[in-house]
């Protein structure tokens, strides 16, 4: 087992990793920008190293500074967390080349899965169905028109190296194709330094379902999560299991996913994502890292996913055993709607309630980074009791001094359509105007 680990991230995910490392007897080194010197992860880590000014491009994304910080503090490994460099094959390779362990899959696997076009072809090779679309990247407007004619409208243009809704445009008619293609390519270049895009048939209101995978000496599936409540392709609420997946579909998904991860030699935590429409499901992508919503799977499986990830990537045998998810878990992401100082904070508790956060009273939320400030997770024997528990916990959660989406999340949990379980990715859009007045 490694003795010291650098966490190349910030905020709640860094706090989450530190807590597991402390239980495992692993020392942690935090990194921080000057805007984050008072962040909770800096306070909790055994050591902390400043790596630059607030802009991510000058701090959390500077690969050489992160590696130097690890070497100078005697670390044996680097955990990339989520976002930032967590799926960056070049960074993983640099870490490996300097004799350090990258807590994630090998760079060759990240490269293969990070390119969404290659990932689609890989999924097809392992027998997973994919949404009808182009076999490779679309090079220009003429090629896009030809693909659109064959596929039919509506279509969606996606960045080959993308994620998080960036470089993604919906096209409903031929007159919209050229402009949206140009915008998608520009967004892809700006966000991922890769202008490559591909085209798929657009499914109007599918469910977004993902399987949580842990892979090492064996491949374990920790059930599925439903992530269909999204705003601009950004997830807001996740739950496990999915109300829209039956036992037959689950078994088919798991069989293809296990085969794919095993034959790729995947190591660590990963998620395979699908779009579900009726009784059909289609491979979408693999996130070659731990996910923001991993606590949902931890609550139903009883597993510490960060611990399993560390064991798998450092060569230790995973202590997974047989995974039989139990009960129902729901996560609400609490996002800040702007910067501010937390002048009052009351965290909910009670049976089956968990809060992952980096907030504390007096903390100044900076304007430079992702808006996620807390994750509220509940677990109960069934969905109805989990919904009631989440409603109660959201009602107890008090954050003053910083505007958040807590009230909007409470409104969604109380909505009859959401409570019915019969919804897809278009759900949020259907109530968005109503939520604008919820404060």
Image (spheres, rainbow, N blue to C red):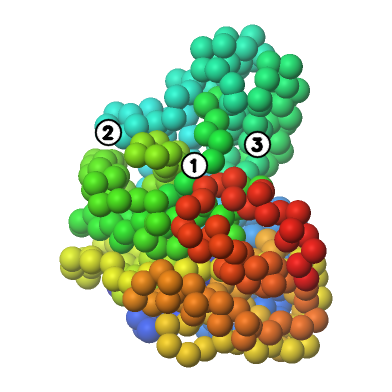
Q: Secondary structure at mark 1?
A: loop
Q: Residue furthest left?
A: 322
Nearer to us: label 1 or label 3: 1
Taking depth in this image into account, of 44 and 369 the one nearest to the observer is 369
User: Does the image show residue 111?
Assistant: no
Taking depth in this image into account, of 145 and 416 the one nearest to the observer is 416
Report which residue position mark 2 lands on: 126
Nearer to us: label 1 or label 2: 1
Q: Are marks 1 and 3 in contact (CB under 8 Å)?
A: no
Task: Name the spot of residue 64 as percent of width and height, x first.
Answer: 59, 55
Which sits earlier in the primary sequence, circle 1 or circle 3?
Answer: 3
State the separation of the CA atoms marked 1 and 2: 23 Å
Which sits earlier in the primary sequence, circle 2 or circle 3?
Answer: 2
- Looking at the image, is 224 positioned above or below residue 167? below
**Residue 35 got which mark?**
none
User: Does the image show residue 346?
Assistant: yes
**Residue 167 got which mark?**
3
Taking depth in this image into account, of 34 and 370 the one nearest to the observer is 370
Q: Residues within 10 Å of mark 2 (few under 14, many from 20)?
A: some
Which sits earlier in the primary sequence, circle 1 or circle 2?
Answer: 2
Q: Secondary structure at mark 3?
A: loop
Report which residue position mark 1 lands on: 206
**Residue at image x 56%, y 77%?**
391
């Amino acid at each position: 087992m490694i003795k010291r680990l650098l966490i190349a991230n910030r905020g709640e995910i860094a706090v989450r990793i530190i807590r597991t490392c402390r239980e495992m007897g692993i020392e942690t080194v935090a990194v921080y920008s000057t805007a984050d010197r008072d962040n909770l992860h800096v306070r909790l880590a055994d050591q902390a190293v400043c790596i630059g000014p607030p802009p991510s491009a000058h701090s959390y994304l500077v690969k050489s500074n992160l590696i130097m910080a690890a070497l100078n503090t005697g670390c044996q490994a680097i955990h990339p967390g989520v976002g930032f460099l967590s799926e960056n094959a070049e960074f993983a390779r640099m870490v490996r080349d300097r004799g350090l362990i990258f807590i994630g899959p090998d760079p060759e696997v990240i490269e293969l899965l990070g390119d969404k076009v290659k990932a689609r072809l890989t999924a097809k090779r392992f027998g997973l169905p994919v949404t009808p679309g182009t076999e490779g990247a679309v090079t220009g407007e003429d090629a896009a028109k030809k693909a659109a004619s064959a596929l039919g409208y509506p279509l969606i243009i996606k960045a080959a190296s993308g994620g998080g809704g960036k470089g993604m445009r919906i096209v409903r008619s031929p007159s919209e194709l050229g402009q949206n293609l140009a915008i998608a390519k520009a967004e892809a270049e700006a966000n991922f330094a890769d202008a490559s895009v591909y085209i798929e048939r657009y499914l109007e209101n599918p469910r977004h379902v993902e399987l949580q995978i842990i892979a090492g000496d064996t491949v374990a599936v920790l059930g599925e999560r439903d992530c269909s409540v999204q705003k601009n392709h950004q997830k807001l609420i996740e739950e496990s299991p999915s109300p829209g997946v039956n036992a037959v579909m689950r078994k088919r998904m798991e069989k293809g996913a296990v085969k794919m991860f095993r034959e790729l030699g995947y190591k660590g935590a990963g998620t395979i994502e699908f779009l579900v429409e009726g009784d059909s499901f289609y491979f979408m992508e693999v996130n070659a890292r731990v996910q923001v919503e991993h606590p949902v799977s931890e609550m139903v499986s009883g597993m510490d996913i960060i611990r399993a990830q560390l064991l798998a990537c450092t060569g230790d045998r995973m202590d997974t055993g047989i995974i039989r998810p139990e009960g129902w878990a729901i996560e609400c992401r609490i996002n800040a709607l702007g910067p501010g100082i937390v002048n009052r904070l009351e965290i909910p508790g009670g049976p089956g309630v968990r809060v992952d956060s980096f907030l504390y009273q007096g903390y100044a939320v900076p304007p430079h980074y992702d808006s996620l400030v807390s994750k509220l997770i509940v677990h109960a024997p069934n969905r109805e009791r989990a919904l009631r528990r989440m409603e109660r916990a959201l009602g107890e959660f008090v954050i003053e001094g910083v505007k958040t989406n807590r009230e909007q999340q409470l409104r969604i949990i109380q909505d009859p359509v959401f409570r019915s379980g019969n919804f897809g990715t278009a759900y949020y859009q259907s109530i968005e105007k109503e939520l604008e007045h919820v404060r």
